[in-house]
Image (tube, coloured by chain):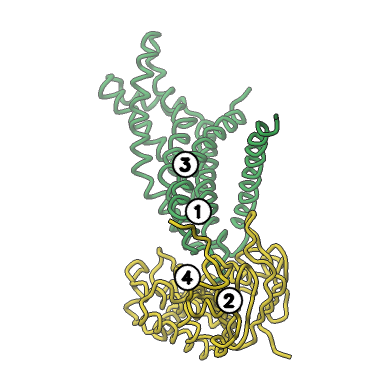
Amino acid sequence: MTDLKIKVRGLKKAFGPKQVLNGVDLDVPRGESLVVIGGSGSGKSVLIKCILGLVEPDAGSIEIDGEETVGIPAAKREEIMRKFGMLFQGSALFDSLPVWENVAFGLIAGRGIDRKAAKDVALRKLAAVGLGAEVGELVPSELSGGMQKRVALARAIAAEPEIIFFDEPTTGLDPIMAQVINELIVKCVTSLGATALSITHDMHSLRAIADRAAMIYEGRIIWSGDAKDIDQCGNAFVDQFVQGRAEGPIRMPVRPL
Amino acid sequence: MSVPVLQPIGRTFLGSLEAIGRLALFTLRAVLHCVTPPFYPRLIFKQMIEIGFYSLPVIGMTAVFTGMVLVLQTYVAVSRLNAEATIPYVVVISLTRELGPVLAGLMLAGRVGAAMAAEIGTMRVTEQIDALRTLSTNPFKYLIAPRLIAAVLMLPILVGIADIIGVFGGYLVSVFKLDFSPSIYLKNTVDFVETIDIVSGLVKAAAFGFIVALMGTYNGFQSRGGAQGVGKATTDAVVGASILILAANFIITGIFFSR
């Protein structure tokens, strides 16, 4: 039996009349990197936020290390959060803090580690993502988009989490910087021995970072398997998405001009 | 036929109840996090500087001109009754009991409440608040509690300073424009003012500080939908705080001074 780090069953979430997640089942084996693909508005971000505990699901079960996390008390949730690291789509760096303090934030505010020791860790993590100590003294608004993503990655791995979530890690980056971020993700996840769950619609990113892949469509996982099999999976929805065709079973609700 | 007419009324009523409930729950959680560890003294100190020190110029200017105008207007009224000697009393009691705390509260709502709503609202829409939670940090402890504590502590100090500056403004006009004796003006001020006048003003200030910070943080925390949402949160924070300050002023005045 596979050792599962994350197990999701029958997950449902609606916002008003819109049913975003409609019974998601998903398994993430320990130490593997799973990438969930899907179109815009297919529920990828909501799925990841439900697993993180940022959005309360309407129904279903989410187990982390075999422990149910839906509906748990706040104190228990904070304890489970210590297992997580998260790279947000827009980086979500704290613009009032210098870069090093952004990276060290979880260590100082979340775990009560001394500021000097936390700064040393932050500078090491910044170096691991290719940023020098001088960058640590800047504020996020002084950085380019690619540098912000690298700082966000350093922040996500600073506390050496067991599970790292990546929300559209390459969105808005040029192809070279996107590949740099993909390689850094692989390097960081491998060196930490972490389990990774990413969501993206960037197929280059999927091929670079995924051990396993799944596709979400209309609030359900419609296919999952080895990432290397995605091109020959035989699922018409996945084929259309992977090949980026406008024609196929996935129809965009557009009207003629 | 009556259903389409009643539906919007019912919806508005239920919406209002829901909003009141949300604010009440937010207040309860915020207060709980103010009194339970962990605390962030560095953040509380930073907010005290932001709310207290940087508000001094605007509160001081408001107070000095209010004291000056108060003397001019009071003089017009009391000179008809040959009761000019009561001017220091009217000025000091008006400032300490009402104008000091209310005007300082309203100015703080505009300066600090709006800034809080804009800052926290931007953090909300750029996922910085979600990021806080993923870094094992409770946003109520980190963002809300320090602002509430700092505002409750700093507004009474600001109002104390505003009272002194306001009386000084009245003194300047009385002495240099209306030819009052400086020593008699100051003596009348000190003789007439009572402890309850100052205490009631400081209690009001603490309450108004709480209201300003609560409305700023609440509206920022609830903001949704990008720049427009942040703009609405900022407006709601200032308008909400201003109305609540005036309502709370009536209630606290009733508690202290109703016979």
Q: Label 2, on which residue?
A: A237
Asked if labels 2 and 1 share a chain, the reply is no
Position in image of residue A102 (x %, y %): 44, 71
- The colour chain B appears in is green
Asked if labels 3 and 1 share a chain, the reply is yes
Q: Label 4, on which residue?
A: A89
Q: Label 3, on which residue?
A: B238
Q: Label 1, on which residue?
A: B147
Residue at x 51%, y 31% (from the top left corner): B197
Asked if labels 4 and 1 share a chain, the reply is no
- Kind of residue at disc 4: Gln
- Kind of residue at disc 3: Val
Position in image of residue A26 (x %, y %): 66, 78
Asked if labels 4 and 2 share a chain, the reply is yes
- Kind of residue at disc 2: Phe
Looking at the rendered structure, the secondary structure element under dot 1 is: helix
What distance separates the C-alpha of mark 4 from that of mark 2?
25 Å
Q: Is residue B171 above or below residue A230?
A: above
User: For the residues carrying marks 3 and 2, which lies nearer the camera in this image?
Assistant: 2
User: For the residues carrying marks 4 and 2, which lies nearer the camera in this image?
Assistant: 2
What distance separates the C-alpha of mark 3 from that of mark 1?
16 Å
Asked if labels 3 and 4 share a chain, the reply is no
- The colour chain A appears in is yellow
Return the residue nearer the eye: B111 or B22.
B22
Residue A42 seen: yes
Q: Is residue B200 above or below residue A5?
A: above
Return the residue nearer the eye: B202 or A3.
A3
Return the residue nearer the eye: A85 or A101.
A85
Residue at x 56%, y 70% (from the top left corner): A250
What distance separates the C-alpha of mark 2 from that of mark 1?
50 Å
